[in-house]
Amino acid sequence: MYEIVFTKKAEKDFDSLDHRMKQRVVQVIERIRLDPKPFLKRLAGTDSYRLRVGDYRVIMDLEEAKKELVVLKIGHRKNVYD
């Protein structure tokens, strides 16, 4: 099982979400902890991945050696890639 680690930026992004979206993000992240690879899509030109949660995206790094999912950023799909 992978450990979930939030960066300071991701914590700030998470705190700015409304209550319902926070619940959805937590549910999806918890669901993928056992085997995240089928649910993550590689971002072009980076080593990061994205996870889709409705119209929101969770940008994360997958650290296989440490068994960690490092959440870098959370935001609406129209602004999260900027």
Image: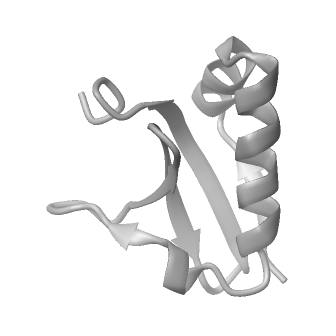
Kindly identify the residue that appears in the image at 61 percent across and 22 percent down: 13
Tell whether 57 sits left or right of 13.
left
Kindly identify the residue that appears in the image at 38 percent across and 61 percent down: 48
Rendered image quadrant of residue 18: top right
> What sort of colour scheme is used for the picture?
one colour
Residue 31 place in picture, x, y as percent: 78, 69
Tell whether 69 sits left or right of 31.
left
Question: Which residue is nearer to you in this view: 72 or 25?
Answer: 25
Residue 23 place in picture, x, y as percent: 82, 38
Question: Which residue is nearer to you in this view: 62 or 21?
Answer: 21
Q: How many marks?
A: 0
Kindly identify the residue that appears in the image at 15 percent across and 61 percent down: 45
Q: Residue furthest left?
A: 45
Question: Which residue is nearer to you in this view: 55 or 5?
Answer: 55
Quadrant the C terminus occupies: top left
Residue 40 place in picture, x, y as percent: 47, 71
Rendered image quadrant of residue 27: bottom right
- The relative height of residue 15 versus residue 23 in the rendered view (above or below) is above
Residue 79 place in picture, x, y as percent: 31, 24
- The relative height of residue 74 versus residue 28 in the rendered view (above or below) is above
- The relative height of residue 34 versus residue 72 in the rendered view (above or below) is below
Tell whether 14 sits left or right of 75.
right
Question: Which residue is nearer to you in this view: 67 or 49?
Answer: 49
Quadrant the N terminus occupies: bottom right
- The relative height of residue 81 versus residue 43 in the rendered view (above or below) is above
